[in-house]
Amino acid sequence: MQGAPTAPPPAAPAPPSAWQQAMSNAYTSPIPVKKTHIGNALASEWTKIKSVRSTMWTLGVFLLLVIGIGLLVAAQTEPRDYLDVPFTIPAFFGLVLGQICLITLGVLVTSSEYGTGMIRTTFTASPQRYRVLAAKIVVFFVIAFVVSAASIFLVGAMTSGMHSGSEAGDVAWGGTVLKGGLYVSLLGVLALAVGSMLRHSAGAITAMLGLVLVPAILPAFLLISESTRSVGEKMMDYNAPNSLAKIFQLDTGSGNGNSQLVLLIVVTLAAIVGAFALLEKRDV
């Protein structure tokens, strides 16, 4: 139409900024990037725990103590000794010493990384710290339980083969395999949590040995006085050696060890909660 205003020409596009040019030229990796999950952390911890020599040494000594001492004890017994006790009794004597191996390994699973500084690399690769600790607990517990339960079962099976007969009883011993393996495995998990909180191998191992040995020794002094007798009796009932003795029915009139196992579960869960809480609050 004559006299109508003409539309202005379109504005030229603004030149790209330096940041936009840098982003357009950024390197793109041909390797596909996937979102990580707990399975990746489990695989990482499994690779670490199976590749260090301390794992093989501690588990090897544990098997040697439990199976070796157990078979030595079984060789000194007779069929009538198992009239009212399970065939896994000989494994108890090896576990009293062998539990120290699992405690040591539990501490080293966490504290050794802090000692070498490798924990910084671990948390850089997996910034979700709770995932790393959870993976350590799961991998260690599975390994400890399988090894301990298998060693107890082996001692029980071999003792049964050596002494089964008309003179021996028929006491079920499958429960002692599960509860015995669970008890010493939980002691190892407790040590792992203590190692995560203290971040020092020697200090955490010393603390755990004190937790296991002191309650076994202190009742001898507490029972002397009437005022401390009740404390000494409770400590005697719930210390680690006597707890294992109850689980293995070494004294048929003193219970089956369920209350001792429950107490250890509660203490271990409390230590795990403390380890998770401190993990997020402290720097590495």
Image (cartoon, helix red, strand yellow):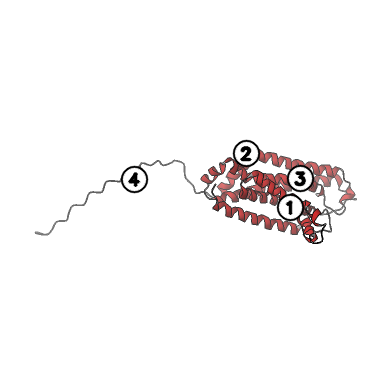
Check disc 1 and report the residue beneath it.
Answer: 178
From this viewpoint, is residue 130 visible? no
Q: Tell me the crowding category of disc 1: few under 14, some 14 to 19, or many 20 or more residues within 10 angstroms, Cα based.
A: some
Cα–Cα gap, marks 3 and 4? 64 Å
Q: Would residue 200 appear left or right of 209 to someone viewing this image?
A: left
Residue most toward the left? Answer: 2
The residues bearing labels 4 and 2 have C-alpha atoms spaced at a distance of 45 Å
Q: Secondary structure at mark 1?
A: helix
Going by the numbered disc 1, the residue's amino acid type is Leu
Query: CA separation, marks 4 and 1?
Result: 62 Å
Per the rendering, the mark at residue 97 is: 3
Q: Residue at x 75, y 59 (%)?
A: 259
Amino acid type assigned to the residue bearing label 3 in the image? Leu
Image quarter of the N terminus = bottom left
- Look at the numbered disc 4 and give the secondary structure of its residue: helix
Q: Earlier in the sequence, mark 3 or mark 4?
A: 4
- Report the amino acid beneath label 2: Ser
Residue 215 image offset from top left, x and y in percent:
75, 53
Image-quadrant location for residue 243: bottom right
Distance between mark 3 and mark 2 Cα atoms = 25 Å
| Residue 51: image tag | 2
Q: Earlier in the sequence, mark 1 or mark 3?
A: 3
Q: Which residue is mark 4?
A: 19
Q: Nearer the viewer, residue 36 or 53?
A: 53
The answer to which of 261 and 207 lies nearer the viewer is 207
Residue at position x 74%, y 57% in the image: 260
Three-letter code, disc 4: Trp
From the image, state whether disc 2 or disc 1 is nearer to you.
2
- Give the crowd class for mark 3: few <14, some 14-19, many >=20 residues within 10 Å: some
Q: Closer to the observer: label 3 or label 2?
A: 3
Residue 152 image point, x, y percent: 76, 47
Q: Foreground mark, 3 or 4?
A: 3
